[in-house]
Amino acid sequence: MPEIHAARRTRVQAKIAALGAEAALITSLVNVRYLTGLTSSNAALLLPVGEPGILATDSRYGPAAARDCPGIELVIERFAESALVSVAVARQLRTIAFEAQEMTVQRHAELISAHAGLTFIPLGPAVENLRMVKDEAEIGLLARACEITSAAFAEVLPAIRPGMTEREFAVLLERAMTDRGAEKPAFDSIVASGPNGAIPHHAPADRRFALGDLVTVDCGARFGGYHADMTRTVAIGEPAAWQREIYGLVAAAQAAGVQAARDGMGVAALDAVSRDMIAEAGYGEYFQHGLGHGVGLEIHEAPMIGYGREGRLSDQVPVTVEPGIYLPGKGGVRIEDTLVVRAGAGAAGSAELLTTTTRDLLVL
């Protein structure tokens, strides 16, 4: 997709010029991939205003960069950041914007000491902000990741039974995702049973499922670099009254959040839609994390949806909606979908759900 990457670089160059910089040094590997198409563990991009850019990587990735990044100058150098700053000096570029949110203090100090006379100014999250709005090709990759996730979950769901451990089920689920075409899991799967369900990010352990458990499964596949994210909570055996109560409340709050996720909706206001329902039912203290987040080349990216957050949703922004209730010592419920905000009036402006597994309480 060289044309897409070139168009992305042009948009970033407008941000660079607006800051009064002559070029930007892009060091976030995710942002380098977004702007060039190169996937690597060592790369950086020097993006002067009005030029295609200079990509630096080491010899391990040189052939891939030459193949996948046409129309951009290539430098093969192990120390990519320093090499690109030297290029900037040679081309008499004096004011360089840099990704302060990614660069360490030590790396920044080394660049300044080795290249006297340059002025470094923060670029800010310029690339991350552009990444929020996905093109249809990106949404297609994300949709495929979600399709794999939903299908893999449906395939292994019958395996949840008394005696199986959390870890065993996590391995089974992740294998099903890769067997169905995932590059890898989007993140380490969460499988939390019984009282472990009260821990939002519980790591699967050797606890065995038991009759009467609620089991929360948070999982996702990665496809084409894009990350799916889905959570479902199921019951082993007939649920107790308290389990049905909190499940019904979380399901209603999640459905309300999905319905409210529209173009122009403030992220704090969206969080309040679900949070207020849970608080009004008397469970507010048991839902303490944000309602959701953006997804894409990273599993957690802008926009962050939570109380005290700023910003608004817009067309073609994929996000998650994931309220939960966590009762210490007893268990918990979380329901999460990945969706894409769509602009338009009426039904045309409804969010597009990418994770399709039923949100009804499944009793196994």
Image: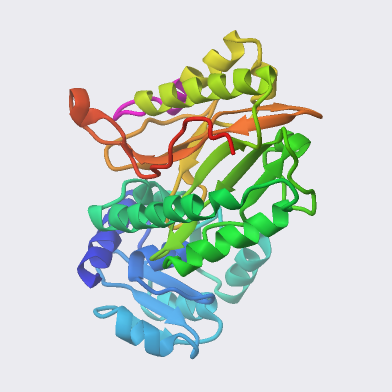
Give the residue displayed 44% in from the left and 77% down from the top.
Answer: 89
Give the residue displayed 55% in from the left and 29% down from the top.
Answer: 323
State the residue in front, 87 or 176: 176
What segment is highlighted magenta in the picture?
261-271
State the residue in front, 51 or 245: 245
| Relative to 9, residue 331 above or below | above
State the residue in front, 283 or 332: 332
| Relative to 162, residue 261 above or below | above
Observer able to see residue 84 = yes
Residue 127 placement (x, y as % from top left): 39, 54
Residue 78, picture quadrant: bottom right
Residue 9, picture quadrant: bottom left
| Magenta segment includes 269 | yes
Give the residue displayed 31% in from the left and 85% down from the top.
Answer: 67
Left or right, residue 189 beside residue 153: right
Observer able to see residue 123 = no
Left or right, residue 196 beside residue 249: right
Left or right, residue 92 beside residue 285: left
Residue 1 placement (x, y as % from top left): 24, 70
Q: How many marks?
A: 0
State the residue in front, 309 or 184: 184
Residue 232 placement (x, y as % from top left): 54, 39
Residue 198, picture quadrant: top right
Q: Quadrant of the C terminus?
A: top right
Give the residue displayed 35% in from the left and 44% down from the top.
Answer: 354
Residue 286 placement (x, y as % from top left): 69, 23
| Magenta segment includes 129 | no
Question: Colour scheme of this structure image?
Answer: rainbow
